[in-house]
Amino acid sequence: MRFARSLALFALLPVFAGCQMFSSTPADTTAGQTRLQGELVSANGQLVFQPCVGQQRYVVRDSADTTLVQDATYMPNKPGKLFADIRGRFSASTTAGTDGEVELQQLYRLERSNSACQDPNFKQVTVHANGNGPAWEVQAGGKGMVLKREGQPDLALPYVEEQVGDGRFSLSTEANNQRIELWVAPQRCTDSANGSVQHLSAELRINGQVQRGCGYFGGARND
């Protein structure tokens, strides 16, 4: 289950000066690459990417052997466009009426959605995670995190980020006598409710109780 994302939630978050700790910036391994969001369509036996903004189309070349092609093939046939959040090397066509190409390097997210291109929170979010049974969602940004749980009021909280190696990290906070942690790892993950594919696995731990789910980097974080 996905909760509606409200820009107002981030507006209500106070600025928690000194509450967050971030590791030093790693060496840039994405030089020459661009991250874009858009729609995937099939044309003439090829997978074509149409960005949310602009009219140029790009034939997908999966040079990094991501799971995009097979994931797009087996994505549940539900209502909504096939939305993709990807990073790669884009080259526009120099011939009118023909498509450019994208050498795919990273798949962040693939899902059925008619509204993902208009997500008002995307550029402010560093990490998004969600799970099911019962449904939960975490949106973390520069001013704190919002925790949503089915049947409970939303919580706006400060947090501390800790890197634990191999691309894994945790976000932790204590509020209302509860220890709340979000543990994230770079691992392909499929949402059990809607079949969406995300590039992170996630665990929400509240006072030691674990709920598993998936996650992805928002527009404020591109590593």
Image (tube, rainbow, N blue to C red):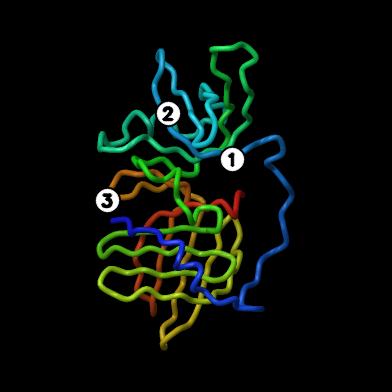
**Residue 209, position in %: x, y?**
34, 74
For the N terminus, the image quarter is bottom left
Q: Which quadrant of the structure image shows residue 20?
A: bottom right
Q: Which quadrant of the structure image shows residue 46?
A: top left
For the residue pair 182 and 126, the one nearer the viewer reads as 126
In the displayed structure, 8 sits above or below 191; it is below
The residue carrying mark 2 is: 69
- Residue located 35% across and 42% down the image: 113
For the residue pair 195 and 150, the one nearer the viewer reads as 150
Q: Tag on residue 214?
A: none
Within 10 angstroms of label 2, few (less than 14), some, or many (20 or more) residues? Answer: some
Within 10 angstroms of label 3, few (less than 14), some, or many (20 or more) residues? Answer: few
**Residue 49, position in %: x, y?**
48, 28
Mark 2 or mark 1: which is in front? 1
SS for callout 1: strand
The residue carrying mark 1 is: 35
The residue carrying mark 3 is: 193
